[in-house]
Amino acid sequence: MKIRATLVVLHITALILLAAEPVFADGHEAIVGGRAAPDTPGDVYWNKFKDSVVLQSEGRLQPKMFIRGEIGPEETLFSRLRRNQLHLAGISTSGVTLVEPALDILRAPFMFDSVEQVGFVLDNYLREPVAELLLAKDLVMLEWMSAGWINFYAKTPIRVPDDIKNKRIRINIDAAALMFLQEVGADYVQVSFSDVLTSLQTGLIDGGEQSTQLFVTGGFGEYAPHYTLSRHAYLNAIIIANREWFDGLTVEDQSIYRSAIPTDAWYRNYIIEENEPYLTQAIAGGQIVHELTPAQRQLWKDRTADLPRKIIDRSGPGAQRLYDIILEGKAAYARQQAEAVSK
């Protein structure tokens, strides 16, 4: 029975792997990879993309969508994308640091103060330099894909840096996040998303950091009822195409795939709209939502002020260049806001 069960597992695995292999049709349809649960913003995003490709090409292009995690974790998605076994995917900037460590600087804590500021800097200042870095790695950047603010959840309130000292906080495999927790004196445990609930139940972790949507839909609030809107990091993914595949398309098809990607401005606004009912749901479920005061937020900023330099020291001159560009963009945004007020 054990042998038979093993063969069944291997057969299923083989089918999944084969599904991810490139199968070129006459129109060179994209094989698209993602990790979106049904009826989530990511699910809406990818289906909007597919519908647009089909509509613009009048049905000639039919993207093959593997957006339910069929291909595996992000590391597998990225590996297959780079080998041209997958043509297009949304990869977090943390994931992209495997080939371009300069992007670590985007995860530096308390870098941005508002979604509007984030959008201004991403769209007007960071898009071209990041696209250049990726092109040098044979990857074509098509668009940003916002993942929203990262906040703290825990069994007890986290409002100021001292509240997190010695707490075991769950993180992904993310160098910048690890450095952040070390800076504020927290312990950290690397736990997969699927194991968070069990880890909270058993006491392996005291809390973690997560977007609002995944905190609520993951059911973490039952065991970690305190959710702090710390907004200590803004997570981004990047919609990336394999350069060999993309360069092999006609100019017309390149244009179709580019224009079919929902704009990040649209997605940022969509996530904001979706998060409101998630927060309402969390409060209705007994979770306690904490908003940092300006003074509390400043304490976090002061405690982590040296982290950008440490991240740059670790990641290299490319990170310094991106950091300088971010500061330039933030200054331009501040001037724009001041001018708008003076009119």
Image: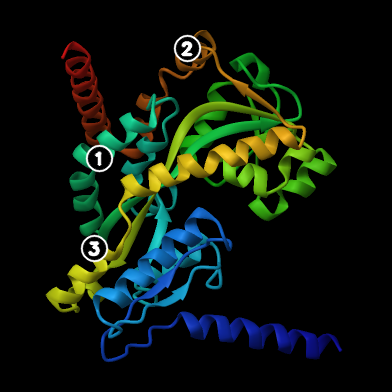
N-term-proximal mark, 1 vs 3: 3
Is 162 drawn above or below residue 205 in the view shown?
A: above
* Residue 243: % across, % down: 24, 69
Which residue carries the number 2 mark? 298
Mark pair 2, 1: CA separation: 28 Å
Hey, which residue is sitting farthest front in the picture? 343
Amino acid beneath label 2: Gln
Q: Residue placed at 63% from the left, 22% from the top?
A: 290
Which residue carries the number 1 mark? 318
Is 251 drawn above or below residue 188 in the view shown?
A: below
N-term-proximal mark, 2 vs 3: 3
Which residue carries the number 3 mark? 259
What secondary structure is marked by label 2? Answer: helix
Residue 236 at least partly seen: no
Tag 2–tag 1 contact (CB < 8 Å): no
Mark pair 2, 3: CA separation: 40 Å
For residue 110, what is the image quadrant?
top left
Which class describes the residues within 10 Å of circle 1: few (<14), some (14-19), or many (20+)? some
Residue 265 at least partly seen: yes
Residue 207 has which mark?
none
Mark pair 1, 3: CA separation: 29 Å
Horizontal arrangement in the rendering, residue 303 relative to residue 210 (left or right): left
Q: Residue placed at 21% from the left, 15% from the top?
A: 338
* Residue 242: % across, % down: 29, 69
What secondary structure is marked by label 1? Answer: helix
Hey, which residue is sitting farthest top in the picture? 295
Amino acid beneath label 1: Gly
> For the N terminus, which image quadrant?
bottom right
Q: Residue placed at 79% from the left, 86% from the top?
A: 5
For residue 249, what is the image quadrant?
bottom left
* Residue 341: % across, % down: 22, 14
Horizontal arrangement in the rendering, residue 153 relative to residue 133 (left or right): right
